[in-house]
């Protein structure tokens, strides 16, 4: 568990009581999200168990909980990070990410896996643990048994790729897009876009991302660009014969103030779409007229819908894609610090998607 900025320790907790409307998950695997890297450096003042990309087996389930999700003890499931109310307009549409009960930015008391402190009973609110508590508000997806644990833990980042590149960017046959950033989110977006039938997928990264760009090519990227060695704007103009692309999906950690103006230039066609994950920075002279004349839709990326997770699991389960190239590292609980730093680039080299396996024996 995290006990301070970039500080973890192992701690034991009693297993919670499981009532009729709750359940207990034996965690099999927990993916390390890029957002964990930023969260690890921040300190909210109370210890917490990180880990929100969780897969496991239901160890115990109350009757009402089991009935709601059609599951039973021994079933393998993926658990979304959102612990939503379940009855607001957003939840009823499967858009749990927009529910106020799980919005940690506007609701200080929001429950969310990987965020909620251990001071909130029963403490087990993160996947870097042997067990995870599931209240009535938990959101589940059945996980096929044949999927390896490291790939099963990709369900949520893959769902982000589906949501951003397909649902939000409206990618499909005849459409083209640029995906900025070859991390696990960007590579998931590449896979999702090509699986949806996109005609042209361009993936950008940096020279140091050569291996990730190669993996992007294996997942379906038609062209890769090293942004620190090539002019992205000119290369896209060249590739598209001056037409530009239909959409841009930014999955980088660069400030939005730098990425949004570039994305606006890359979208040449009318009614283009820009999806931006990056935040930060201020644009003193925002090109609003260019945005308006191109009739571009600019949207921030925010998580995934229930439907996108279901589609992501189908993609993983199909076995059609070389996902083993994304699953680069696994660590046990005593090495959570190294797992997070590896995703951030300061730990084990070559990391793309890193998985914590709580029951893995330490070497």
Image (cartoon, rainbow, N blue to C red):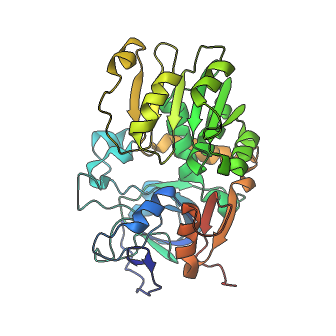
Give residue 121's position: percent from left, percent from top: 30, 76
At horizontal 50% and vertical 76% (from top left) the residue drawn is 129
Residue 19, located in which quarter of the rendered image? bottom left
Query: Is residue 57 in sight in this rendering?
Result: no
Residue drawn at (55%, 50%), measured in percent from left and top?
Answer: 157
Assign the N terminus to one quadrant of the image. bottom left
Q: Residue at x 44, y 69 (%)?
A: 50
Q: Is residue 63 left or right of residue 237?
A: left
Q: Is residue 306 above or below residue 150?
A: above
Residue 59 percent coordinates (x, y)? 53, 74
The foreground one among 15 and 316 is 316
Residue toward you, 273 or 53: 273
User: Relative to residue 10, is residue 99 depicted above or below?
Assistant: above
Which quadrant is home to the C terminus?
bottom right
Q: Is residue 222 rendered to the left or right of residue 31?
A: right
Residue at the spot 33% in from the left edge and 70% down from the top edge: 43
Residue in the foreground of this view, choosing between 237 and 191: 237
In-front residue for pair 147/182: 182
Q: In this figure, what is the number of numbered marks?
A: 0
- Whole-percent x and y of residue 63? 42, 66
Displayed quadrant of residue 186: top right
Left or right: where 178 falls relative to 41:
right
Q: Is 356 situated above or below 145?
A: below
Q: Position of residue 48 (x, y in %)?
A: 37, 74
Q: Can residue 331 be seen at all in this image of the molecule?
A: yes
């Amino acid at each position: 568990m995290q006990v301070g900025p970039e500080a973890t320790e192992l701690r034991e907790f009693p297993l919670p009581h499981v009532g009729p409307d709750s359940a207990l998950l034996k965690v099999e695997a927990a993916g390390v999200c890029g957002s964990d890297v930023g969260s690890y450096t921040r300190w909210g003042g109370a210890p917490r168990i990180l880990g929100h990309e969780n897969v496991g087996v239901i160890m115990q389930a109350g009757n009402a909980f089991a009935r709601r999700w059609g599951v039973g003890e021994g079933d393998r499931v993926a658990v979304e990070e959102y612990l939503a109310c379940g009855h607001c307009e957003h939840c009823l549409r499967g858009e749990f990410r927009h529910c106020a009960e799980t919005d940690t930015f506007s609701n200080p008391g929001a429950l969310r896996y990987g965020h909620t402190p251990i001071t909130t009973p029963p403490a087990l609110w993160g996947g870097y643990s042997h067990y995870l508590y599931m209240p009535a508000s938990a959101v589940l997806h059945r996980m096929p048994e044949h999927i390896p644990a490291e790939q099963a833990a990709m369900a949520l980042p893959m769902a982000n790729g589906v949501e951003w590149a397909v649902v939000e960017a409206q990618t499909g046959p005849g459409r083209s897009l640029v995906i900025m950033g070859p991390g696990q989110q960007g590579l998931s977006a590449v896979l999702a876009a090509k699986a949806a039938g996109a005609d042209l997928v361009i993936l950008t990264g940096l020279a140091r991302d050569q291996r990730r760009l190669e993996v992007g090519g294996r997942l379906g990227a038609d062209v890769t660009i090293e942004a620190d060695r090539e002019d992205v704007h000119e290369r896209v103009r060249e590739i598209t014969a001056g037409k530009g692309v239909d959409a841009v999906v930014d999955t980088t950690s660069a400030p939005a103030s730098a990425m949004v103006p570039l994305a606006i230039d890359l979208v040449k066609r009318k009614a283009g779409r820009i999806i931006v994950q990056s935040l930060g920075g201020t644009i003193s002279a925002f090109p609003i007229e260019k945005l308006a004349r191109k009739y571009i839709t600019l949207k921030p990326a925010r998580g995934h819908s229930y439907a996108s997770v279901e589609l992501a699991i189908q993609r993983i389960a199909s076995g059609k894609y070389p996902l083993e190239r994304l699953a680069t590292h696994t660590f046990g609980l005593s090495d959570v610090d190294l797992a997070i730093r590896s995703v951030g680039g300061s730990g084990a080299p070559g990391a793309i998607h890193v998985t914590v396996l709580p029951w893995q024996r330490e070497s």
